[in-house]
Amino acid sequence: MKNIIITGGAGFIGSHVVREFVKNHPESTIINLDALTYAGNLENLKDIEDEPNYVFEKADITKVDELRRIFEKYNPDAVIHLAAESHVDRSITDPNAFINTNVNGTANLLNLCREFWTLNPDHTHGNFPDQSRSNLFYHVSTDEVYGSLGETGFFLETTPYDPQSPYSASKAASDHLVRAYGNTYGMPFIVSNCSNNYGPNHFPEKLIPLCISNIINEKPLPIYGDGKYTRDWLFVIDHAKAIHQIFFEARTGETYNIGGFNEWQNIDLVKELIKQMDEKLGNEAGHSEKLITYVKDRPGHDKRYAIDATKLSSDLGWKPSVTFEEGLSKTIDWFLENQEWLEHVTSGSYQEYYDGQYS
Ligand code: NAD
C-alpha cells in the first residue's frame, strides 16, 4: 500500500487516524486531504508534521478540480473518508452545507476513485473475492444514521436506517452512496458507524470540551431539555485504532459498528465531569454544579443512541482500551495542559493563520 488519502485529517477524529497510520506505516505515504474549515486545525498534527511519510494537501471535497489535482499527483491506493460537516446544531441552521459536503463531496470522491481505479465489474453485490486492500474506499460514519432508540435495545449493523437530523440524513445518504458504488461498480468498500467520540483535540462546540472550557472559565454548562438524553461514548484514540484495524483486517463489503459499551445520560456525564474537574482544579466538591443550566431543547432531538459493537469485538478482537472515567480524566488533563489550543481554536486565529499559509 503506497499512497493512502485520509480526508478530514485535520479534524478531531481524522487527526488521530492520520497519526495512527503515519506512526504504524513508514512504508506508506499518508496524504491528509482537508479544506481546513473552522473545524480543521493543523495544530492537531504538530507532533507528526515533519514525518517523511506524512503530507498535507489543502483541498475541498465539494470541488472536483481540487480533488482531481490530488488524485493525479498521488494516484491513491486507498481512501479513508472522514471529511464532513459534523455538528448537528449547525445542520439545523444550515442544512445545505451538510448536503453539499457530506453527500455531494462523498459522491465527488467516489467518482474520482471510480475513474482512477481499475474495478472488476464482476465484483458487484458485495462479492469481493479479492480481499487485498488495494483500491479500498473506507467510509467513516456515525450511529446517528439509525435514528433514536427507546429505553431498551441497541443498534446493530442490520438496524434499518432512520436518520432524524439534517446531519444524520446527510451521513445516511453518503453511506448509501458508498454501498451503491460497491454494489454497482464493484468498488471495494468498508463502512463503520461509530458512537459519540471524546478526547484530545475535540472542537469546543461539542458537549464535553464545551463543559471543560466553561468549568475552567466558570461559565454556564448548557444542558438540553431534561438532561436525560443518552449517548454511548468512545475515547477517540480507541476509535482511531478501530479504524486502523478494520482497514487492514476486516472483509471488504462489510459494515462495522464501533462503540464504547458505555451509555451515559447527559446530566450524569456532566456531573462526572464536574466531579473530576473540581478535584483536579482544587475546588470544593460540587463547586461547579451551580453552573448547570438547562436550555431549550434541540428540535427533533434523538432520545437515546446505544451501539452494539459485538461484531467488531468477535470478528477482530477489538475492545476499548480505557474505561470512560479513565478516558475522561485523560481528556481533562489534555485540555488543562493545552489551554492555548483551546484559545486559538475558539478565537479562530489558527484558522486565519493557516488560510494565509495555504491559500
Ligand atoms: P470534525 O468536524 O472535527 O472534522 C471534520 C474535518 O473535515 C475538518 O478537518 C474539516 O476541515 C474537514 N472538512 C469539512 N468540510 C470539508 C470539505 N468540504 N472538504 C475537505 N475537508 C472538509 O469532525 P469529526 O468529529 O472529527 O468527525 C469526522 C468524521 O467522523 C465525520 O465524517 C463524522 O460524521 C464521523 N463521526 C464523528 C463522530 C463524533 O463523535 N465526532 C462519531 C461518529 C462518526
Image (cartoon, rainbow, N blue to C red):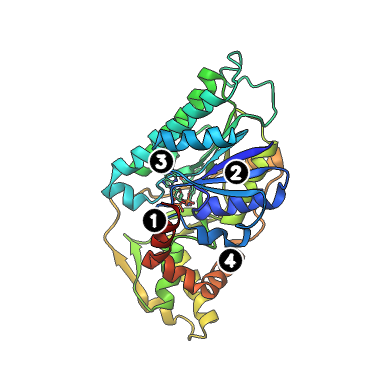
Q: Residue at x 58, y 14 (%)?
A: 121
Asked where in the image residue 15 lies, by quadrant, the reply is bottom right
Amino acid identity at mark 3? Gly
State which quarter of the image contains the N terminus: top right
Tell me if 181 is positioned left or right of 21 in this view.
left
Can residue 96 be seen in the rendering of this structure?
Answer: yes
Q: Which mark is residue 278?
A: none
Badge 1 local density, few (<14 within 10 Å), some, or many (20+)? some
Disc 2 versus disc 1: nearer the observer: 1
Labels 1 and 4: the sequence-earlier one: 1
Towards the viewer: 185 or 279: 185
Mark 1 residue element: loop
Q: Which mark is residue 38?
A: 1
Towards the viewer: 164 or 23: 23
Q: Position of residue 313 (x, y in %)?
A: 67, 43
Badge 2 local density, few (<14 within 10 Å), some, or many (20+)? many
Amino acid identity at mark 4? Glu
Alpha-carbon distance for marks 3 and 2?
17 Å
Q: Which mark is residue 309?
A: 2
Alpha-carbon distance for marks 1 and 3?
27 Å
Q: Residue at x 29, y 48 (%)?
A: 92
Badge 4 local density, few (<14 within 10 Å), some, or many (20+)? few
Mark 4 in CB contact with mark 3 (< 8 angstroms): no
Mark 3 residue element: loop
Towards the viewer: 268 or 33: 33
Alpha-carbon distance for marks 1 and 4?
29 Å
Q: Which mark is residue 147?
A: 3
Alpha-carbon distance for marks 2 and 4?
20 Å
Ligand 1 within 8 A of label 1's CB?
Answer: yes
Labels 3 and 2: the sequence-earlier one: 3
Q: Which mark is residue 325?
A: 4
